[in-house]
Structures are given as structure tokens and as C-alpha cells.
Amino acid sequence: MDGGAAKILALHELDDISWARQHAGICRYADIRGWKVVSLRCDAADAPVAEAVRKVRPDGVISSLNFRPGKDVFHGLPVAYFDCPAIAVARGAPYLRHDAEFTAHLVARELSSMNCAAYAFVGVYMEHSREVPIWSRTRELFFAREIRHRGGTLAAPFQPDPDMDAAARRRELKKYLVALPKPCGVFAANDSAAALVRRAALDAGLRLPKDIALVGVDNDARICMRSRPTITSVAPDWEGGGYAVAAALGSLIDGRRVSGSGRMTFRPLGLFRRETTSHVSLREDARIMAAVELIRAKACSGLGVERVVAAVHSSRRFAEKLFREVTGSSILEEIRRVRFDAAKVLLSSTRCTLPQIARRIGYSSVPTFCREFKEMTGHTPGVWRIQSGLASDAPYSARQRSRAQKDNDAMLQ
């Protein structure tokens, strides 16, 4: 089908910061493809989903729902699933999940550096479903495994009692924290749980991080930076995950196989260290998150390293050091990665020429684009286009394949 004509239905349950970033990633991919994205928030019922499918008449669906709609709701449409329980995923469909194992690794590494006497996990309770979500239990499991691997002592986890009201659960959390060996490193399942731990610890007269070292997940600045002390948190790459799940759906729509279906994960951007794991007040390294967002928004518009450094408001050396500590890559590497993500979409889903693609992703020189693309991927753009399966509906001839490879190799000379 013509990728430019596609209409995508994105289904979600919560209007939170995680969804906002995921949606931004979906839209970044959609903009490259010329798709229209229609978003719908709905609860655990088939009727709103079925009605949306009927009204929107989408060419594909991205579902972040925690339930699985009836088998006839999507009418055979291509569907990709994002960070939802396995029970909500249709068998064999692309399924992208947050990397809970690597998140637990980051948290355990941070808390272990505090030389704690013991380590504990505080789960979350979802009021609307009256249960502890699977993702909370998964983070608990991997954290426990990581602490044991490091030779640490594990305290019993705190799991909220669904039969208690909110006030009673807060009292129980306070008692739990008081009883823990000190100092204790606490991994809260998300930032909301971390905020509850911080409040309960302070109410109990405990000191952070001297008595309780604390790490959450989501890096929600509205929670982490407004708390006193500020809360250390892992930042999931929701935007990158949204882009990846949209790319998986794009492959389905194009009739191409999605490799790794059911086993795909997206890693966090990194851990943002703040006062709950540090004895000194640290600079606001949420600037790196803003820098990443700037790169993803402007990389294909000729963005340079200098402009990103200026957004961090520091020297280039410090900005580069902090950026690599948080993201694992340099500023230039991240700019190139975003550009080549876009190039891969254009190569695999359009018949744009190489000069057209180079211009659209911010390169004024086609040879430079081709050379750096090969350095990053190991293939010239022409060879990558052939191997990506663009020609599944109109196969290249042997002569076309040979010419594409020769043309691109020539540009690298």
C-alpha cells in the first residue's frame, strides 16, 4: 500500500508523561512516513475500541492497553503492542517492552555504590484495577536477582495491601521503612511510589540518603525535582520506544517481516542522579533529557553539536561528559543515530533518491551521508534498501541490485 496514505490508531489508557513521550516517538516516525495518527484513551472495555476502529478506519493500530480487545475488534488489521502485559498481546504480533532487567541493573549499581546494609523494593498498587501491576513485579524480580548477584542482603519487599485505604497503606509503609536495616537502598517501582517512600521516611524521622537511599523510575520532573530532597530516577526511553513500535507497525503495513517479535525491548536513557543517592546537591542534569528531546526534534534539520551544548548551558567538555554518562553515547553519535533512523525509514518505505533522502535528514553532501551511513550500519544506503525488503511488492532485478550497489560504492570513493 502507499505508506503516505496510512492512518494509524494509537490506543492508550493513561494521559501521563510516559504516554506523552511515547506519542512523540510515534509521531516522529509518522511524520517521516506521512502518516496521520489518531490517539484514543480508553478503559478496559471493547466498545470504545470497536467504535474507534469503525470511525477512524485505520490502516494499522498501536496498542498500549492493559487488556486485549476481542478477536474481532481489529478486523485483521496490522497491530503492534507497546509496553503492555503479555496477556494483552495477540500471538505472533510485534511486542515492544521496557527493559526491566537493564533498569534493575542501573538501580542496583547506583544503590550498591552507597554501601548499604540491605536493599528493599517498594511496589505500586493501581487503584483502578485493585492489583499490583505485572511491570512492578517484574522490576522487583530483576532487582532481587541483581542484588543477590552483587552479594547484597535483600529485605522483604513492600507490596501495598489492596484491602487497605490509602492512609492505612501510608502508615504501613512508614512502619516498614523504620524496620529496615540502616542504611538501606530502596528501589521504588516508579516515581509516584518513590515520592510516597520519601514522605513516609521523612515522617518517620529518617534521613535521605543517609538512612534511606532511594531510586524511582520514569524521571518525571514534576515529582523528582519538586521533592525535597530531589529523587534519583531511571529515565525510560519512552520516545525511542514509541518510534520503534511505530517502525514495527510500518513493517507490517508494508508487508515485511518484523524480526524479534515478542522479544523486543527498549533500554532506558540512563539514571539521573539526584539528592536521594548523593550527599551533595547536584546540578540539574534533567538538561540532558532536554538535549535528547532537542536532538530528536531537530537532528534532521541540520542540528549541530554546538547548539546542543548551548542547550545544556555548560562547557562542551562537561556537556559531552554528562551526556555520555546518561545516554551511553556522544552528542554527535545521537544526532547521527536519529538521522539514520529517519534515513532507514525513507530507504525502506519510499522510492526517494539518495540526494532527496540526504537533504531530508540534514545532509548537504550525498557522499558524506553515504560514507557515514556505511560507518554506522556496515552497508551503503543502496544495499541497505535492497536488504530491507522495500521491493517486496515490486522486486528489483539482478541488474538493478548490482547497479544500486555500484552507485553507492562509487559515492564512497
Image (cartoon, rainbow, N blue to C red):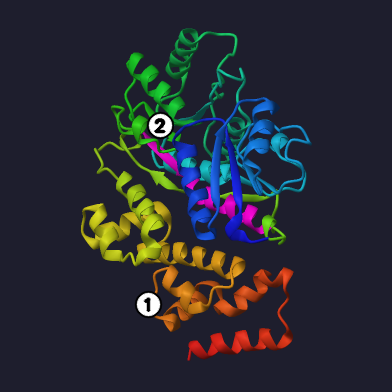
Of labels 1 and 2, earlier in sequence is 2
Q: Nearer the viewer, residue 170 or 294?
A: 294
What residue sits 67% from the left and 73% below the top? 387
**Residue 77 falls left or right of residue 164:** right
Position of 138 with respect to 367 (left or right) is right
Along the line of sight, the residue nearer the viewer: 257 or 130: 257
Up the image or down, 98 lies above or below 224; here it is: below
| Residue found 72% across the figure and 34% down from its top | 87
Residue located 48% across and 91% down the image? 413
How far across and down, in percent of the image, does residue 263 sit?
Answer: 68, 50
Dot 2 amino acid type: Leu
Check residue 338 for magenta coloring: no
Q: Are marks 1 and 2 in contact (CB under 8 Å)?
A: no
Secondary element at tag 2: strand
Along the horizontal axis of the image, is 248 left or right of 180? right
Which residue is labeled 1 in the image?
A: 364
Quadrant of the rendered image containing residue 90: top right
Q: Residues within 10 Å of mark 1 (few under 14, many from 20)?
A: few
Q: Which residue is mark 2?
A: 214
- Image coordinates for residue 183, horizontal then vertical, percent: 40, 28
Q: Which residues are drawn in magenta?
A: 231-251
Quadrant placement of the N terminus:
bottom right
> Where on the picture, by quarter, is residue 301?
bottom left
| Labelled disc at residue 308 | none
Residue 237 in sight here: no
Q: Position of residue 166 (x, y in %)?
A: 48, 11
Dot in front, 1 or 2 = 1
At mark 1, the secondary structure is loop
Q: Residue furthest front?
A: 55
